[in-house]
């Protein structure tokens, strides 16, 4: 929305309306939360911090600009229910710095600290009970469109890299057919006269998805000890490519640190700490079932001397419970699941994990994780919920020498 500086300056000259709000400086967090929620509950809009009510660009100091951006992200995650995905951009206009906050129209109804607000004209107002009820009803029905199919603000067709989206267009095509096919696959979404990339489109077809979707990457850390201690941190990586590449990179990170023990008494026996097939299933599940609307955390993978921990943001989808995980097949991100089920693994990884595609969709993943890991370590992996994050702990197998195998 208002993507060129020329268009944005023209809007500033015209003043506030249903789509744009000015703030001279960073307001109180509850007040800004109300403004953001009001736009999300309406048609979306833009908040400019560093522009006063008289349409004058007053700007922010660079230090204040950085602080304001951090606060905005925290407000959207911590002060609005459910969290609002936004896009922030630092801009220079007339040698002054301002912060642009783009708020998309939401499929949810958002509550901020002072209630439920909606944008009307150039101001927000609290919704009366009857209007709130109608909005809740209409957006509940709209949720047949899942989050991974929603548009991402400030994106366009060119946001999707051809080398990535071509994997999902199998038929022969001419250039003028591409946009229509990407729309049909929901990698692109129409917004009035504009074309935007969808959440799934960005996650699967952009080189660095976290440029648009905050924290949409995998963080991996290897410790030589049994606790998170920087003194024992041996290796750490952030994997930021398309989701399928993130999966492979995280898989290879574990493979690199998957210590093998060996016995040579009769032939040679090798035993790894972890089943790489189970690890692959766990990483794929974390990526497919993560709640990408929660921008406050990323997928985190920790390897310790005695265990592996994998955290994925979001509670369990639908009516699934921890006890039912082995037997359930609910999918939070149906579009992402379909796309990953179409991508073929290379021969090396495919042979290790005994499958052809990233996702086979047979509902066997949790069973493989539990069974193969328990066979190695003698301990059943544990699934737990911690602060709206699903945590999986896989225990490392003891060395053959330590376990006394002959």
Image (cartoon, grey):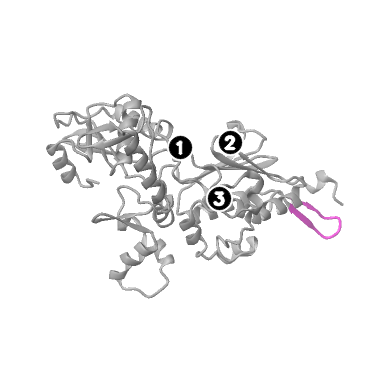
Q: Dot 1, crowdedness within 10 Å: few (<14), some or many (≥20)?
A: some
For residue 296, which numbered disc appears in the image?
Answer: 1
Name the residue rendered at 21%, 30% in the picture.
Answer: 59
Gap between marks 1 and 2, in whole Å?
14 Å
Q: Which of 256 and 74 is in front in this view?
A: 74
Dividing the picture into quarters, in which one does residue 120 lie?
Answer: top left
Tell us which disc is closer to us: 1 or 2: 2
The outermost residue toward the front is 130
The stretch drawn in magenta includes residue 222: no
Q: Where is residue 1 in the image (x, y as percent from the top left)?
A: 25, 46
- Mark earlier in primary sequence (3, 1): 3
In the displayed structure, would residue 85 be above or below residue 199? above
Disc nearest the viewer among 3 and 1:
1
Q: Residue at x 61, y 58 (%)?
A: 363
Judging by the rendered image, the residue that carries numbered circle 3 is 250
Residue 379 point in image, percent of width and height: 75, 45
SS under mark 1: loop
Residue 378 location (% of width, % of height)? 77, 47
Element type at mark 3: helix
Mark 2 / mark 3, whichever is N-terminal: 3
Residue receiving disc 2 = 386
In 3D space, how far apart are the residues under numbered discs 3 and 1 (Cα atoms)?
20 Å
Answer few, some or many: residues within 10 Å of disc 2's Cα (few below 14, many 20 plus, some between 14 and 19): few
- Residue that appears at 61% across and 62% down: 362
**What residue sits 40% from the left and 45% below the top?**
213
Give the extent of the magenta segment.
Answer: 261-271
């Amino acid at each position: 929305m208002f993507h060129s500086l020329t268009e944005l300056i023209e809007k500033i000259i015209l003043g506030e309306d249903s789509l744009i709000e000015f703030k001279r400086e960073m307001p109180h967090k509850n007040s800004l939360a109300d403004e953001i929620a009001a736009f999300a509950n309406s048609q979306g809009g833009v908040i400019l911090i560093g522009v006063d009510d008289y349409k004058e660009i007053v700007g922010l100091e660079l230090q204040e600009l950085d602080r304001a951006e951090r606060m905005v992200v925290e407000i959207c995650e911590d002060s609005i229910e459910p969290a609002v995905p936004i896009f922030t951009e630092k801009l220079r206009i007339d040698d002054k710095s301002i912060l642009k906050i783009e708020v998309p129209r939401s499929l949810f109804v958002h509550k901020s600290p002072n209630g439920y607000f909606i944008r009307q004209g150039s101001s927000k107002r609290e919704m009366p009970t009857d209007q709130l009820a109608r909005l809740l009803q209409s957006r509940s029905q709209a949720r047949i469109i899942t989050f991974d199919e929603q548009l991402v603000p400030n994106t366009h067709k060119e946001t999707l890299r051809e080398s990535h989206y071509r994997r999902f267009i199998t038929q022969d095509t001419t250039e003028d057919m591409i946009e229509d096919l990407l729309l049909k696959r929901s990698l692109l979404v129409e917004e009035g006269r504009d074309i935007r990339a969808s959440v799934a489109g960005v996650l699967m077809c952009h080189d660095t998805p976290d440029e648009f979707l905050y924290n949409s990457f995998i963080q991996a850390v290897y410790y030589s000890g049994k606790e998170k201690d920087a003194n024992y941190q041996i290796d750490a990586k952030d994997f930021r490519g398309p989701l399928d590449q993130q999966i492979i990179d995280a898989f290879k990170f574990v493979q690199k640190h998957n210590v093998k023990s060996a016995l040579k008494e009769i032939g040679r026996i090798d035993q790894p700490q972890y089943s790489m097939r189970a690890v692959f299933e766990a990483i794929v599940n974390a990526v497919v079932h993560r709640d990408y609307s929660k921008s406050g955390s990323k997928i985190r993978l920790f390897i310790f001397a005695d265990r592996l921990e994998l955290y994925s943001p979001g509670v369990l989808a639908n009516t699934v419970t921890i006890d039912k995980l082995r037997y359930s097949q609910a999918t939070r991100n149906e579009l992402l699941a379909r796309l990953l089920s179409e991508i073929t693994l290379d021969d090396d990884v495919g042979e290790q994990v005994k499958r052809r595609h990233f996702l086979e969709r047979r509902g066997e993943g949790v069973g493989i994780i539990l069974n193969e890991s328990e066979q190695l370590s003698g301990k059943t992996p544990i699934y737990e919920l911690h602060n709206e994050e699903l945590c999986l702990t896989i225990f490392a197998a003891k060395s053959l020498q330590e376990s006394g195998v002959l």
